[in-house]
Amino acid sequence: MALDKAPDQEDNFLAGLATRLWHVTMSLAEPVMAGIQRLIGAKRMPWVFLAPNLVFFATFVFVPLLIDFGYSLTGGTHLFLSQRPWDGSAQYGHLFNCQNFSNPNSCEQDRFWHAIFNTGTFVVFQVSAMVLASLITALALNKRIRARGFFRAVFFFPVLLSPVVVALIWKWILQRDGLLNAWLTAFGGSKVLFFISPHWAMFWAIFVSVWAHMGFYTLILLAGLQAIPGDLYEAAQMDATSATRVLWRITLPLLMPNLIVVVVLALIKSVQTFDEVYVLTGGGPGTATLMIVQYIYETGFANQVQNFGLAAAASVVLGVALFFLTLLQLALSRRKGEAL
Amino acid sequence: MSLLLKRRHRNQWHWTDVAAYIYLCLGVVLMFGPVIWLVMSSFKTPSALMEFPPSLLPLTQKMAQSSGREALPLYTLTQADGTSREVVQLHRMGIMATIASPNHPDQTSQVSIDALTPERHIEFATDNYTKPLREFNFLRYLKNSLFVTIVATIITLLINSMAAYALSIYEFKGRTAILLLVIGTLMIPVTVILVPVYLVATKLALVNSLWGVILPGAATPTGVFLLRQYMLTLPRDLIEAARMDKASEWQIYWRIVVPLSAPALAVLAIFSVMWRWNDFLWPLVILNKSEVYTLQIALNAFQGELQVQWHYLLAMTVVTLLPVSLVFVFLQRFITSGIATTGMK
């Protein structure tokens, strides 16, 4: 694993302070740990080291995962499982009670189906735009250009911003008297109320989310591009191969494993989209940009009546979808491993 | 001869180079422009923010202070003969304005407002920053965010490094099972187990407490994975030598393995700071009282109000993005190399 050296030379004071604190606390723990070791023997010590992490995993991941199914099979509005009446598959029945699956309005839980359709639209357009944008950016960054580090940093910067900050930056630009409308009127157009129109709202939800995350995928693709041996390009140059031919015959085929990783990662993230879109549009106008995770959040927590059972059932549905996406990822990465 | 030709060919500008530069420069405007726009806007007064079309710089109307009267806005009057002079505007009705010379406010005259251009100067409305921090509790939200970020990062580094140590240095029965468990956890996103984690947090009395934000995400599978991969590369002889010297397992952990893993720990620390500072969905679920809000939750609540006070909101957004930007400026290469090696963020 190639990592740069730790930044301890750069901030000596902080590193010194951390080191001193570390030494003091760890020495204090020493007699206790030595006692434990004497008691159980060095062979069992790894379990002691694993214990805190495992306790956290168990409490906040594995137990909840089991409870999740329990919730989805019970009804009522109580939080604690013991107080909730057994409901069988009724919650799923509510979710899937539709006269016509192609029309969300005919469903009992119309918001759930609106959310599914919206998430579907969002995923298709966001993932394709994301992959295309990060591929083009990675290709441009991979050329022999000046100030590559600067350009790379600029494209990466939004990745670090919080979803709330990202959404607010764009909300401010896109509002009625915002920068974009100022430009539109300056070029002879008229103001557009972007968050009143369902199509514009969806467009900007996709745009903003690509803007915020493309730097991450660019970085993965750039690493892949830099791993392609340079002599291939030199040979192509000797043969006076055209740039487009080089792209289709050398670059893209050799980048394929990384592209697959990027597509699947982007898919898994995209299905779970919540925060940026929630702050930017609030799921509106109406239900035009309501996503599955927002549906879960509102059903379980934000609505007047907290319907934990329905929220849990919806999150089990989401979990199943993600499970299959993960299987796809594993299958593809295994094939990639065999090819290499 | 052929060598010369090859050289020249390589130094020539190909159209793809030009295209790349144009694309990247447009990219800089698109990726960085919005952030600049935010920072500039955050220094504008409410009236400057209402202006349409907006200006880039935070400009405010110049005012003339005269004795015994309220301050009056200064304008430049373009006269019929083409010359211009400075005037103050007393009041305005329709397209006509009543003006006067700044020195003699009593001698008024009427002009069309088309002849008047406002005199403006750059002024940074620092009120946008100081007021919400002092009066709207934003200092508290800032403290909450700092507390969560720092404490969570320390806990994460400690317990993750312990687990990674156990999984990399020892060979023991059940190691593969635990490793699979860790990787399995990696696949379970918080969105899927939102409701039951909330139940667990309620049972543990963690709702509406900052510990409720910190603890559920403290054991990160990403962190264990990243640290373990690094610790596997450490020389085994060193550990064997320490055992010969009768060092306890705990001493090997904290005196040898952790200091040697500093580079990987630094990467995890940076990641953890970013995760925690930017965390949104889980705090949104578990924090319902405004005293315990983190910055992100407070910003969201503030922007959801009926009358959005954009001047405060924008300034607080800048405060929120400042720490991660500083981390980025100073530690960019650790972040990018961390992502390149783990494929995670």
Image (spheres, coloured by chain):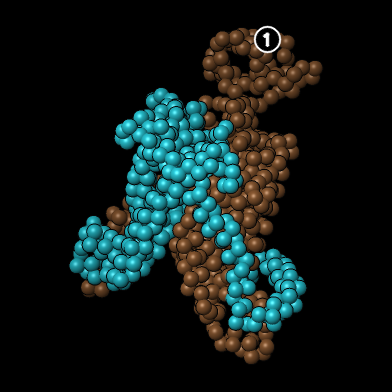
Chain colours: A cyan, B brown
Apparent side of residue A133 relative to residue B324 in the rendered image (left or right): left
Residue shown at the point (60%, 30%) measured from the top left: B305
Residue A6 in sight here = no
> x, y percentage for residue B116?
57, 18
Residue B58 quadrant: top right
Seen from the viewer's position, the closer of residues A218 and A39 is A39
Taking depth in this image into account, of A18 and B109 the one nearest to the observer is A18
Q: Which secondary structure lies at badge 1?
A: strand
Q: Quadrant of the C terminus of chain A?
A: bottom left
Q: Nearer the viewer, residue B304 or A238?
A: B304
Q: Is residue B45 above or below residue B323?
A: above
Q: Of residues A189 and A1, which is closer to you in this image?
A: A1
Q: Establish if A2 lies above or below A182.
A: below
Residue at the right extreme, as displayed: B68
Where does residue A103 sit, x and y in percent of width and height?
33, 32
Query: For mark 1, does the 10 Å Cα neighbourhood hold few (<14), some (14 to 19), or many (20 or more) residues?
Result: some
Q: Is residue B65 above or below residue A319?
A: above
Disc 1 sits on a residue from what chain?
A: B
The extreme bottom residue here reads: B244
Q: Disc 1 marks which residue?
A: B108
